[in-house]
Image: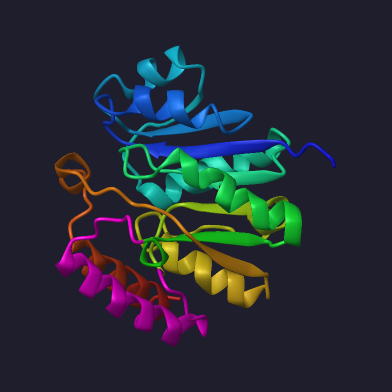
Amino acid sequence: MKNYKIIAVIPAYNEEKSISSVLRDVKKQVDEIILVDDGSGDKTSEMAEKEGACVLKHLINRGQGASLRTGTEYALKRGAEIIIHFDADGQHQIEDIPKLIKPILKDGMDVVLGSRFLSPKSNTPWLRKIVLKMGIFFNYLISGIKLNDAHNGLRALSKKAAKLIDIRQDRMSHNSEIVQKIAQYNLSYQEVPVTIFYSSYSRNKGQSSLNAFKIVWELLWARISR
């Protein structure tokens, strides 16, 4: 079987407390790591470089969507055949990376999406669970694709999908945008169970349930302002 080049793209903003341990784990599962420092004011970049990651920098904080776009474009230039999107705050588990890769290698899937609702291990707060379930319905209305988890940042893209899915939403609504473009380009996709670990640290980094309402507003504004 052909050896596929697997590159992880990790957006980061002021993640010096978690980034070293995250990178040490992730590099066990992939060939390269591209970390996009999204205007951090701490030592995120320096610590990432010490762990051997390729570091790209935004001069200002542009948002997770913009960081994923920057990292994904560079990963393609680096010859990536599978791209993993992975968070920097420790909420994603490296044991889930092989689950994301397998459907692409075995079944030729274009996109593999992690779902916390297919895993009994995820400790999703009850309020966030309710909001996310509402988001699933909203996402279905705008894309026609019904998922178990529409706003999970842990995913894998084939080279074909990464080229077609041009992320234009700079902030958190990029998750829904990706699903819309899966539908637009008729890409094959699959959900796999993954574990999301919510800590006090990750919640303080912007993982609050109220953030979901910002996502809905960003998507609605994007459609109105076209």
Instruction: Provide the major secondary structure of the magenta segment.
Output: helix
- Point out the image quarter for the C terminus: bottom left
Q: Residue furthest top?
A: 50
Q: Which residues are magenta?
A: 120-149
Image height of 187 relative to 113, above or below:
below
- Residue at left 52%, top 48%? 69
Q: Is residue 6 left or right of residue 114?
A: right
- Residue at left 29%, top 71%? 132
Tell me where residue 63 appears, x and y as whole percent.
35, 48
The quadrant in which residue 139 appears is bottom left
Q: Nearer the viewer, residue 64 or 7?
A: 7
Image height of 61 relative to 99, above or below:
above
Q: Is residue 130 left or right of residue 162?
A: left
- Residue at left 55%, top 38%? 8
Q: Nearer the viewer, residue 47 or 121?
A: 121
Tell me where residue 97 appears, x and y as whole percent.
53, 44
Image height of 185 relative to 165, above or below:
below
Tell me where residue 5 appears, x and y as whole percent.
71, 36
Q: Is residue 85 visible?
A: no
Q: Nearer the viewer, residue 67 or 109?
A: 109
Q: Is residue 5 visible?
A: yes
Residue 127 falls inside the magenta stretch: yes
Tell me where residue 199 appears, x and y as whole percent.
19, 44
The quadrant in which residue 204 appears is top left
- Residue at left 22%, top 74%? 130
